[in-house]
Image (cartoon, grey):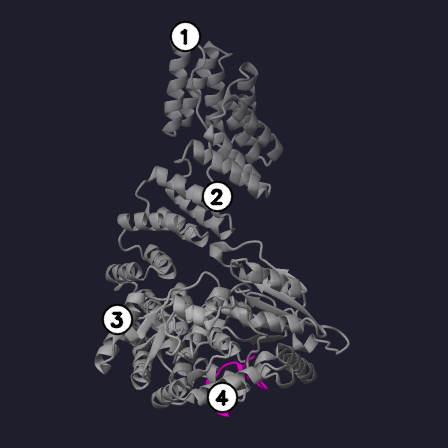
Amino acid sequence: MTEMNTSSSSSSSPTPNFETLTQQAELYYAQGQFSEAIACCRQALTLQPNWPPTYVTLANILQAQGKISEAISLYSRAIDLNPDLSQAHLNLGSMFYRQGKLEEAIACYRKAIQLQPEMAAAYWNLAKVWQKMGKSEEAIASQQKALELNPSLGGVEFNLSQGYRLAEEGKLDEAIAVWQAAIKVKPDLAEAYGQIGIILRNQGKFSEAIQHLKKALEIQSDYATAHQHLCGILRDGNNYKIAREAVNKYSQECGEADRIMTAIYVISTYQISGLNEIAKDRFFELETQLREDISIVKKSVELRALYGNFLFSLPYLRDDIEANSSLYKLVSKAYTQLRLKSKFNHQQKLANLEFSKSRKLKVGFISSHFCRHSVGWCSLDIIRELGKLNTETYVYSTERLKVDDQTHKFSQVVTKFYVPKKYPQGIADVGEIISEIQQDKIDILIDLDSLSLPINTEILYHQPAPICISWLGFDAPYISGDNYFLCDWHTHPQDRDKYYVEKLLRMPNSFVAVSGFQRIEKSQANLRKSQRIGLDQIVYLCLAPGKKFNRDLVKAQVAILKQVPNSILVHKGLGDVEVFQAAYHQACQTEGLSIHRIKFMDRFATEEEHRSIYSIADILLDSYPYNGGTHTLEALWFNLPVVTHVGEQFLSRMGYSFLQSLDIQLGVSWSWEEYIDWGVKLGQNSNLRQEFIDRLVKSKESENLAPLWNSKKFAQDMYTVMEKLLINGAQKN
C-alpha cells in the first residue's frame, strides 16, 4: 500500500511574492531539485514567517530527504498557525507512521478526516496503520472507504490483487467491491468482471454471475476461466442446449491454448445432456494424449480437473477394469506428485496410538452431502447406528452445504457436526478441516465422496487420522497405499485388489445398508390413470439421467418392448429430454416400434414424491455401465423387480451386490442378451414377477431381515472391521 502525502495550496491571501516563491518551491520539489526548493521556502518565510502552506511545503521536501524529525517540527508549526490545515495533519501522520508511532499517526489521520471527510488519502493511510497493527477488519473498512472516494487510488493492478487476497480470505463481498472499484477506473477490465462472476456463482447468484461472465467474454473472447464458469453454471442449471452452445464456443475460442480444460468441459457437458457417444469420442482422444505423454499437463488447475472431472466421467463411458484402473493410476499419480504436497503434520500415527476397547472409538466422516443427496440418504442410518455403539461420531462438511431437513437429522445423531468458518470459492479450507480432525483426535476418518470432490481426497492424502477410508460416494480415489476402500465381495471379487492403490476392505454382506425410504403413498390405479397408463399394461421403468444414458441401453430396452406386447417404458431422468426422445425415436424406428411405447415423465419436487414412481412400474431396467445406486435401492425397497447388467468395475456391480445381499438371483444378467432376456421373461411371466416381489417382501420381515435393510448389523460389522484395523495397526507399530 503506497503512503499518500499532499502538497499545500493557498488558504489565505498573502502577497504574490509569498505565493509565487512557495509555488516555485513546489515545482522544484516535483522535479527533484531539493536545494533550490528549500531556498525558495526559506526566502518566502523571511518575507512572511507565519504563512502555514510554506511550512508544509518545506516539510514535504525535508521528509523526502529522510529528515523526519525536522519535517515533524515544520508540520506541527503549520498546524499551530492553522489548526484546520487538513493536509498538514495527514502528512504529520505519515511521519509518525514512519517512526513507528502508530497511535499518534491514527490521531493525525482522524483529525484530517474530521476536517475533510472526503480526503481519500487519509483513509488510505489509516488503513495502512490498521494493517500494521493486525486489525484487518478496520484496515479493510478504511481501504474500502478510500477506494469509494477515489477508485483510482490504488491503481488497477492493486485492486485486482487486493480482490484476490480478500477472496482467498473468504471475504467475498469485500472482494467484489474492490473489483467493482477497479472497473470504475478501467471499464474494459475483463478479469474483474470474470472474478466477480465466479464469486457470484459460488454464492448461488447465477443470473448475476452469468451477466458478469458474459461481459468478461464480450471484452476478452478467449478468457478461458470465464468460459469455464459460464459453461459450469449453464451445465449444472440444466440449460442443456445453451450449455452445449457455450462449451462449443469455449472450445472454438480456447481449444488450441487450453486443450485439456476445453476437452474436460465438452465431455462433462455432453454427458449431462445424455450425449455420451459424443463425450466418449472426446474422452478417448484426450486419454490417448495423456497415455502418450502425461507431462503435457503443466498447470495445477488442469491436474485437479483431470482428477476430479475427467476420471469422474470414466465409469459412465467404459466398463473395462484393467484399462480404467491404468488410467486412474496414471492421472492420480501425476495429481498427487505435482499438486498434493505434505504441508500438514501427521499428528496421529499408529505408532503412538493407544487403542483400548474400554474407550470410545472416534469415527469421523467428511462429505459435502449431509443433506438430501444419494450419499446423505445412504449414510444416515449407518452413522446413526454407529453412534449407538462404543463410538463418538463426527461429521465435517467440506463444501458449502445445502442445509435441509436431512442435515438436521445428521446433526441430531452425531457427537459433533462441524461446519467450516470459511469457504473460499465455495469449498472449505483444507488446512482448517485437517486441523479440526486432528484436534478432535479422530481414530478413523471416512470419506464419503472420493474423487468426485477432490478436497476430500486431498484431506485423506494428508492422513489426519491413523486410519483413512473411502466409502460409498464413488470408486476408490487412488491416492495412497496406506489408506483403504470399503466394499464387499460382490462388488470386488478376490482378483480385484491388483487394480487398486488403496487396500480393499470387504464387508461380509454388502457395501451399504439402508433402513428404508419414505414416500407419499398413492395407489397404482390412481397413478396410472393420472398418467394415462392402462392397468393391464406392463410398465418398464428407466431412471437413467443423462450421464448414465447411452445407445446400448436404449437398444436393449426397445428390444424388450418389442417382445412384450402391451408394454411401455417410462423414462424419468435428469438430462436433455430432446436428446432422450431422439435416441428412443431412432431405436423404435429401427425395430419398427411405435414411439408412443415410450413415455417421458418430469422430475418431482421432492424425493418423497419421486418415489411414488415405483408404484406405477412393474419392472426397473437398471443402467449400465454405471448402475443405479440409490434409485435401485429405492426400487427394491418398494418391492419392484429389477433387471441389472453386471460388469467388471465397482459401479457396474452395485445392482448385483444389492440382489446378492437379498439372496435373489432373478434379474441378474452378464450381457445385453441376458439383460433383454430377463426383461422379456419378467414382463411376460406374471408368476416369475410375483416370485421376485415375494422375495423382496420377505427380505424386509423382521425374522428374515436381509443385510441390505439391516443398517444396525452393517454398523456392527463396520465397527468390527475398524476395530480390527486399529488393533492390528497398533500391534505392528
Quadrant in which residue 293 is drawn: bottom left
**Residue positioned 52% across, 36% down in the render:** 142
Q: Look at mark 3 in the image and give the residue it sits on.
A: 582
- Mark 1 surroundings within 10 Å by alpha-carbon count, few (fewer than 14), some (14 through 19), many (20 or more): few
- Comparing marks 1 and 4, which lies closer to the viewer? 4
- Is residue 316 shown in magenta? no
Label 3, secondary structure: give it: helix
Foreground of the two, 18 or 676: 676
Span shown in magenta: 482-510
Foreground of the two, 207 or 666: 666
Question: Which residue is outermost to the right?
Answer: 358
Q: Look at mark 1 in the image and give the residue it sits on.
A: 15
CA separation, marks 3 and 2? 48 Å
Which of the two discs, 4 and 3, labels the residue nearer the N terminus?
A: 3
Label 4, secondary structure: give it: helix
- Mark 3 surroundings within 10 Å by alpha-carbon count, few (fewer than 14), some (14 through 19), many (20 or more): few
- Comparing marks 4 and 3, which lies closer to the viewer? 4
Q: Look at mark 4 in the image and give the residue it sits on.
A: 691
Q: Position of residue 21 (x, y in %)?
A: 39, 16
Q: Are marks 1 and 4 in contact (CB under 8 Å)?
A: no
What amino acid is labelled 1 in the image? Thr
